[in-house]
Image (tube, grey):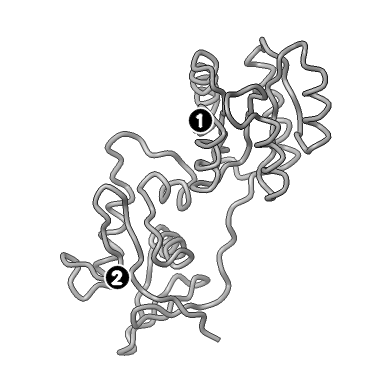
Amino acid sequence: MDETYEPHILVVDDARDIREPLGAYLRKHGHRVTLAADASAARTAICNGSIDLVVLDVMMPGEDGLSLCRWLRSSGGPPVILLTAMADDADRIVGLEIGADDYVVKPFNPRELLARVRAILRRVPPTRDPVPSGRRAFAGFVHDPATGTLLAEDGREITLTTAENRLLIVLLDRPGQVLGRDQLLDLTQGREAKPYDRAIDNQVSRLRRKIEPDARRATIIVTEWGGGYRLAADVVDVA
């Protein structure tokens, strides 16, 4: 596993007094953490970002942890550690049968949980999205992700920085989709956004200056106020 990469852990527990201290503890020990109070919020987090491992409470109101674990396994989701009550032997057995990777009994020692998280991540290293090998055309440009270059209709070749190339790959993978700043940071850099983090805004501005006819009135990478950014162009694979 890349030593510079901080694994992204999703903690799902309806008990705030468990969820938030555990999140703080995992962050202290080098992990990125997203917190979810129920299965619905967990599903949103999993669909919107690159989650490497889920710490999942079994007993939650609404959809329980076993149901969410079953969905994760059926959809090829990340590894799962179940949090179970001491008396719930049946839940532990069922959880392992439906695909949970491990379980920890409440009340638990956070050091033990951290050790189990690390053990699973050593066995199932976090996966990063591979760089696409094919070229794609959009808005009068042809993008070659392998070389990080753009070929314009007038023959100009535009060189992208590594960060700009990653950002463009993410946008081309999701044409027309509104991507929030936090989501873009997670997809491009594998890290959470901090308050007032403008890294993505700066990258978008630099990329716009290279591809937009008028960067101040963007028509290719458009801003969705309160939502993030959207690639407003059709994307076509180039043979």
Q: Nearer the viewer, residue 110 or 48?
A: 48
Quick one: label 2, few (<14), some, or many (20+) residues within 10 Å?
A: some
| Quadrant including the C terminus | bottom right
231 is higher (above) or lower (below) than 188? below
Q: Residue at x 44, y 76 (%)?
A: 235
Circle 2: residue type:
Ile
Q: Residue at x 32, y 47 (%)?
A: 199
Q: Residue furthest front?
A: 62
Q: Residue furthest bottom?
A: 154
Q: Residue at x 28, y 45 (%)?
A: 198
The residue that label 2 is drawn on is: 220
63 is higher (above) or lower (below) than 146? above
235 is higher (above) or lower (below) than 153? above
Q: Nearer the viewer, residue 50 or 70?
A: 70
The disc at residue 36 is: 1
The disc at residue 215 is: none
CB atoms at circles 2 and 1 under 8 Å apart? no
205 is higher (above) or lower (below) than 66? below
Say what secondary structure mark 1 lies in. strand
Q: Residue at x 66, y 42 (%)?
A: 78
Q: Is residue 31 left or right of residue 97?
A: left
Picture coordinates of residue 113, whole percent (x, y): 67, 21
Badge 2 or badge 1: first in the primary sequence: 1
| Quadrant including the N terminus | top right
Q: Is residue 28 left or right of residue 212?
A: right
Q: Is residue 229 left or right of residue 82?
A: left
Picture coordinates of residue 137, whole percent (x, y): 43, 80
Picture coordinates of residue 191, whole percent (x, y): 46, 41
Gap between marks 2 and 1 measured at Cα: 34 Å
